[in-house]
Image: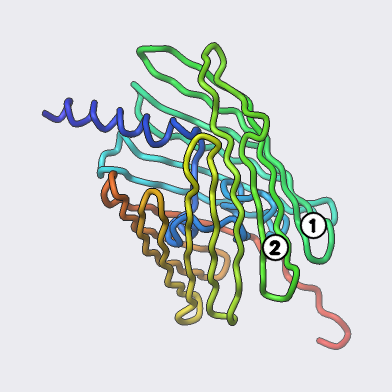
Amino acid sequence: MKRIFLFLSILLLNHFLFAQYQFDSGARQSGMSGSGVVISDIWSSYHNQAGLADLEGFSAGLFYSNMFNMPDLRETSFAVALPADKYGSAGLNYSYSGNPASNFSKFGFAYAKRLGKRITAGIQIDYLRLTQLSYGNSGAAVGEIGFISEPIKNLYIGAHVFNPWRAKLNGTEDYISSVLRVGAGYNFSEKVLVTAETEKDIDKPIVFRAGTEYNMIAGLYLRGGVALNPVKYSFGLGYNYKNITADVAYISHNILGYYFQFGLGYTMVKKKEKTSEDK
C-alpha cells in the first residue's frame, strides 16, 4: 500500500512541479501565498532577482518544504548572495525536489544592480536537470530577468520573466514554461505590507495572488495570503533576531492538501561608520 501511495505521489509531483520546471522557495513569500515579486531578501533569487540589489550585506538562506509529510517528496533549497556596493549583488542558488527515482534540480547564478534611486534590475542564468529512472536524464539552460521600482514613496512595482526564450529539455520535445509575473506592494506603515500580483504561464490561465505581512512586535511577523487558480490559502510567521531570520509557512492547496515550509536566513549587516556628528 505504501508503494502504491508513493507511486501516486510521484505522479502528482511530476504533474505539479515538473510541469513548470521552477521552484518558489522562500517561506516568507509562501506565507503570503507566493506574492513576493516586489519583496527584497535572499529568496529574491527565486521570485525576482532585482530584489537582491537591496541586500545590506552577505546573505545566505536554507529552505525546506514537505509535501504529504513524506521525506521522498521534500523540496530543499540553498541560496547565497554578496552585495559589492556600487558594483551590484551576485548570488548563487541550488534547489532539489523528489527522490532517487524521480527528481528535479536547479542551479542558478544571479546578478542584480541598482540602476537609479528608484529602480533595481536583476538577471539569472539557470541550469535545470530532470532525472527519471524510466527515461534517463535531461536538462536545459534558461534565463530570468526582472525589475523593481518605487515610483512614489512606499509603493513598489515589480515584474519578472522566467525562461523568456522558451527553451526546451535536451533530447526531448518538451518546452519549458515561460512565465510572466507582475505585481505591486505598499507599505501602509512601518508595520504593514500588502502585496498583490498576477502570473501568466504561456500555456496556463492567469493566477492571482495577494498577501500581507504585519510586524506584531519587534522582530515578530504575522503573514497571510490567498491565491486563485488554483485556490491556495496560506499562513506564516517570521522572527528576526539580530542577523538571523526564521520563517515558517503553512499552505492549503486545493489538490495537494496541507503542507509545511520552513526557511532560515542570515545577513551580515555592515556596521555604519560613526560620523563627526555621532561622536
Extreme residue in the front direction: 205
10 Å crowding of disc 1: few (<14), some (14-19), many (20+): many
As displayed, is residue 107 above or below residue 133? below
Extreme residue in the left direction: 1
**Spot occupied by residue 161 in the image (x, y as percentages of width and height):** 64, 43
Q: Residue at x 40, y 61 (%)?
A: 226
Front residue of this view, candidates 2 and 61: 2
Q: Which mark is residue 56?
A: 2
Quadrant occupied by the N terminus: top left
Give the residue type that dot 2 points to: Glu
User: Residue 106's quadrant in the figure?
Assistant: top right
Of the numbered discs 1 and 2, the one sitting upstream in the chain is 2
Q: Is residue 279 visible?
A: no
User: Residue 131's quadrant in the figure?
Assistant: top left
Q: Is residue 62 left or right of residue 259?
A: right
**Spot occupied by residue 154 in the image (x, y as percentages of width and height):** 67, 74
Disc 1/disc 2 C-alpha distance (Å): 13 Å
As displayed, is residue 190 above or below residue 239? below
Front residue of this view, candidates 210 and 274: 210
Give the residue type that dot 1 points to: Arg
Q: Name the residue that disc number 1 marks.
A: 114
**Spot occupied by residue 177 in the image (x, y as percentages of width and height):** 54, 32
Q: Residue at x 54, y 49 (%)?
A: 199
Secondary structure category for the residue under label 2: loop
Q: Which mark is residue 163?
A: none
Tag 1 near tag 2, CB within 8 Å: no
Which numbered mark, 1 or 2, is in the foreground of this view? 1
Quadrant occupied by the C terminus: bottom right
Q: Residue at x 45, y 62 (%)?
A: 32
